[in-house]
Image: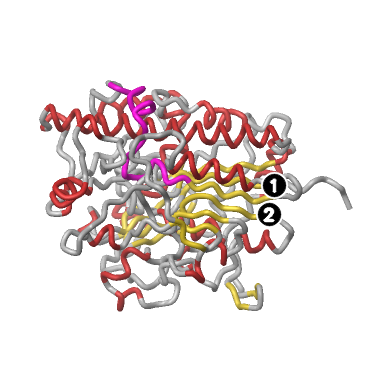
């Protein structure tokens, strides 16, 4: 037996923006010294995948198995649209009891487990963090909320279904919390990233090993941050998104993370006009949204720095295993631009004037990879067994692969930054699959199959890409491979009630 102290774990999840995974490489214009430091002193997972949306990723992260098994084969927000279709096991819309949650396992093994931030894995009392292994807990239950804790008071006639299905519910240890809205940009009052971080720091113990789960709601829409952060980036995005995209592609090539001849997929953004076709006002608003986004990221980074400083203060930094990731690909929606919803939001509840973007009562949304959140393309998911018994109930066995051998090899290497151990998943591993809303993918080694319906910018047929040569998913090789190997090309549809 050895007497080595058990390690702590700190999992930090940014919300809805996979570029944060590669921020030190792709976004030199945004000031992120703390994330940069983590990247420089740790290990960068350059081929890291999540699900195409937030709650499916979170269910896999906490269960170690496929989101269809863990209960998020469909997101809770979508169930009211078609209850009959989604009324099958694994599509409950919450982290079900067929899986043992990671904090439950650690709690049973003597860890202090704590959560601060966005949950998005169940709204009912029996599915709250306090019932799934976290003690203590502070959580935003739905998928998004105003970052200043302010929500408009709707009349019955004004109520928008989107917001009705995303109530701004906060709970502390299972009990509802009513926040005092911050309508004055007062730094001592509520702002999501600041508050979640302060709360987590208060929770951190010094007397036992801990599993700390810090879940930012940033930079998920609505894009909101103080002018102090927003205005640091004034003018940086005035050239438009295509210029920025080409700069970032050039940066990827310079760093050797993509080949020199890699081609980016064409931009698919049906709700957004070309930059050259926009009016001066539209371009100014678009640039202001990006300035606000950049400020949100810098604020998030500053809060990560606060946690790291606290770990240093209590002497636990060197004994803490830290993971920083996002929960899905970049946001592709521009809901404020949609007919009816956009007019209703602007006329009834929001102020999206140029000077007001980023304030508590503004509401705006905002890669070199293909498409974005909700799609099984790389723009949506890329970041660079047998039943058993648990707590008296039958649960699914873990299907994920242990990270321990991979990181143990790195820990035993004199210079882990230049070491090249085997990848976590290789060509000899079983294929890994994703599916959400009939948008599916299957990957084995460098090869990736994608299925997307025509209504989701697809072909309603399986496509095949070699990501080692074509990371932008621009050359569908399915026909070529089938002609060569004599296989049959199946079309048809994809079942929505069965995991891929």
Work out whether 410 lies above or below 450.
above
Residue 329 seen in the figure: no
Mark 2 secondary-structure assignment:
strand
Q: Residues within 10 Å of mark 1 (few under 14, many from 20)?
A: some
Q: Position of residue 119 (x, y in %)?
A: 47, 56
Work out whether 390 lies above or below 444.
below
Span highlighted in magenta in the image: 216-234
Please identify, in this view, whether the residue under mark 1 or under mark 2 is nearer the observer. 1
What residue is at 39 percent from the left and 72 percent from the top?
498
Q: Residue 60 bears which disc, if any? A: none
Q: Main secondary structure of the magenta part?
A: loop
Mark 1 secondary-structure assignment:
loop
Q: Position of residue 260 (x, y in %)?
A: 39, 28
Q: Residues within 10 Å of mark 2 (few under 14, many from 20)?
A: many
Q: Nearer the viewer, residue 304 or 491?
A: 304
Q: Position of residue 1 (x, y in %)?
A: 89, 53
Residue receiving disc 2: 112
Q: Nearer the viewer, residue 258 or 197?
A: 197
Quarter occupied by residue 437: bottom left
- Mark found first going from the N terminus, 1 or 2: 2
- Dot 1 and dot 2 residues touching (CB under 8 Å): yes
Q: Nearer the viewer, residue 459 or 338?
A: 338
- Taking the magenta stretch, the answer to whether it contains residue 26 is no
Residue receiving disc 1: 205
What residue is at 24 percent from the left and 40 percent from the top?
267
Q: Nearer the viewer, residue 97 or 478?
A: 97
């Amino acid at each position: 037996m050895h007497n080595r102290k058990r390690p702590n774990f700190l999992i930090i999840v940014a919300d809805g923006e996979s570029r944060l995974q590669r921020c030190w490489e792709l976004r030199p214009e945004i000031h992120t010294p703390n994330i940069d430091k983590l990247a420089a002193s740790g290990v960068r997972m350059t081929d890291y995948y999540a699900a195409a949306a937030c709650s499916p990723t979170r269910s896999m992260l906490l269960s170690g198995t496929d989101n269809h098994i863990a209960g998020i084969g469909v997101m809770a927000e979508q169930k009211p649209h078609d209850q009959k279709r989604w009324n099958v096991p694994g599509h409950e819309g919450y982290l079900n009891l067929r899986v043992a949650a990671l904090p439950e396992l650690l709690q049973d093994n003597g860890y202090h487990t704590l959560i601060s931030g966005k949950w998005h894995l169940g709204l009912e009392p029996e599915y709250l963090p306090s019932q799934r292994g976290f003690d203590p807990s502070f959580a935003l239950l739905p998928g998004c909320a105003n970052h200043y804790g302010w929500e408009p008071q709707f009349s019955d006639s004004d109520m928008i279904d989107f917001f009705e299905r995303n109530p701004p519910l906060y709970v502390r240890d299972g009990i509802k919390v009513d926040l005092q809205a911050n309508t004055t940009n007062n730094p001592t009052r509520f702002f999501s990233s600041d508050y979640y971080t302060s709360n987590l720091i208060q929770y951190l113990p010094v007397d036992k090993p801990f599993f700390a789960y810090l879940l930012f709601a940033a930079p998920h829409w609505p894009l909101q941050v103080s002018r102090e952060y927003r205005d640091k980036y004034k003018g940086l995005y005035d050239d438009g998104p295509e210029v920025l995209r080409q700069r970032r592609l050039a940066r990827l090539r310079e760093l050797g993370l993509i080949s020199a001849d890699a081609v980016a997929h064409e931009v698919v953004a049906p709700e957004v006009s070309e930059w050259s076709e926009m009016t001066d006002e539209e371009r100014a608003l678009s640039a202001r949204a990006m300035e606000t986004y950049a400020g949100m990221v810098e604020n998030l980074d500053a809060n990560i720095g606060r946690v790291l400083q606290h770990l240093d203060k209590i002497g636990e930094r060197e004994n803490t295993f830290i993971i920083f990731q996002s929960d899905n690909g970049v946001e592709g929606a521009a809901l404020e631009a949609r007919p009816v919803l956009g007019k209703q939001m602007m006329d009834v509840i929001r102020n999206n004037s140029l000077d007001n973007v980023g304030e508590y009562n503004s509401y705006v949304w905002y890669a070199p990879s293909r498409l974005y959140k909700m799609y099984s393309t790389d723009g949506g998911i890329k970041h660079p067994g047998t039943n058993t018994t648990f707590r008296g109930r039958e649960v699914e066995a873990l299907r994920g692969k242990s990270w321990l051998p991979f990181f143990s090899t790195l820990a035993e290497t004199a210079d882990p930054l230049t070491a090249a151990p085997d990848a976590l998943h290789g060509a000899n591993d079983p294929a890994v699959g994703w599916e959400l809303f009939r948008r599916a993918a299957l990957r084995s080694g460098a090869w990736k199959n994608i299925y997307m319906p025509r209504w989701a910018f697809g072909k309603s047929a399986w496509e095949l890409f070699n990501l080692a040569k074509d990371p932008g998913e621009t050359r569908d090789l399915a026909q070529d491979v089938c002609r060569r190997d004599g296989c049959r090309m199946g079309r048809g549809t994809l079942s929505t009630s069965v995991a891929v």
